[in-house]
Amino acid sequence: MAAEFLVPILDDLKSVNEKVAIAFKIKSGNLTNFAHVETESVQNYLHPALVLFSGRLLGYTGSKLVSLAAVTQLIYLASYVQFQIPDNCVRNFVEEDPRDGAQLPVLVGDYLYGRFFVELCDGGILQFLDPLASIIADMNIGALQRRKHWGFQTTDVALDLFVIEKESAILTEGAAKMAGILAEVSNEVIISLAEIGFNLGMGYGILERNLNPELAVPYFETVSEMLQEFPAGEARDGLECLVNQLKNGVLAIPLRKMGQCEKLKNIPNRLSNDKQNQIYLG
């Protein structure tokens, strides 16, 4: 069952899911045999929905927007896979489950980064290769800082927010900006859309890393305020509903899982089971 606010973009979301599913199919089976990619509902639609709604805010739809949504999701999934790779643990390829090791997930993540290039070519949006390469470089800087300081949480909130900006918000900012570029609107509008993407990524990144949820509220409120600059309609309503459900804890926000290290196994989820309202595409 789809979340009601996704209904206007449901057909395009299904097209995105099909593109991602094709990327995961290989001759020997599926990439999920070689890396943990156990995503939950919101992880499957948040990034594509941002792109699709962003285009619709400006009256733009079409195959290039769908391809951009798929590219954004492939980059997110590549980072998601590599986020889980053990670093401060003993690296041993001979694992009971090879997905818990380092070598195969590294290769799967790199493969997914390569697949986004294929989608850029097939979708006729190769002009976004350079900005996306820059985004991925920034994401890697964030990952290096996170691993340097070890784990989901430090005692330095400023450092946590810096890492979230690099690993999460840079991608959502760029994705929304590129949707605006496809719509061929003014630079002023593109900048506003990029700011919406940035703040959504910051808020979501805070929640999925199990930081104090109050830190996310100002970012979500900024998104809600900036959306009022855009025309009323299904796209604006959809983004407002997404933001409100994230802010109010209606949507279940699964934690990003880091490598199978004892130090991280017992970190509790921010949401209790009775508060989690899982919403699935279907």
Image (spheres, rainbow, N blue to C red):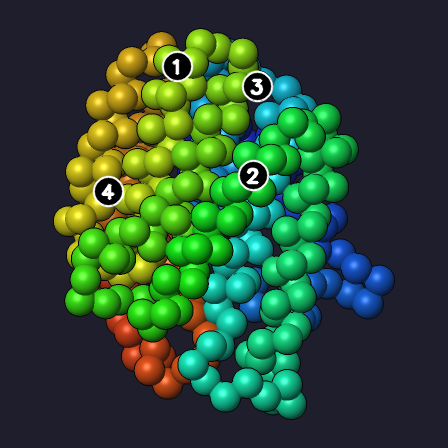
Q: Earlier in the sequence, mark 4 or mark 1?
A: 1
Q: Residue at x 34, y 51 (%)?
A: 164
Name which residue type carries label 2: Leu
Q: In whole angstroms, how far apart are the C-alphas of marks 4 and 1?
A: 25 Å
Classify 16 as above or below 273.
above
Name which residue type carries label 3: Leu
Label 1 residue SS: helix
Q: In whole angstroms, how far apart are the C-alphas of marks 4 and 2?
A: 28 Å
Label 3 residue SS: helix
Q: Residue at x 26, y 51 (%)?
A: 161
In the drawing, what numbered circle is on residue 247? 4
Q: Which residue is mark 3?
A: 182
Q: Are marks 1 and 3 in contact (CB under 8 Å)?
A: no
Q: Nearer the viewer, mark 4 or mark 3?
A: 3
Q: In whole angstroms, how far apart are the C-alphas of marks 4 and 3?
A: 29 Å
Label 4 residue SS: helix
Residue 76 located left or right of residue 31: left
In the drawing, what numbered circle is on residue 132? 2
Label 2 residue SS: helix
Q: Residue 222: in sight, yes or no? A: yes
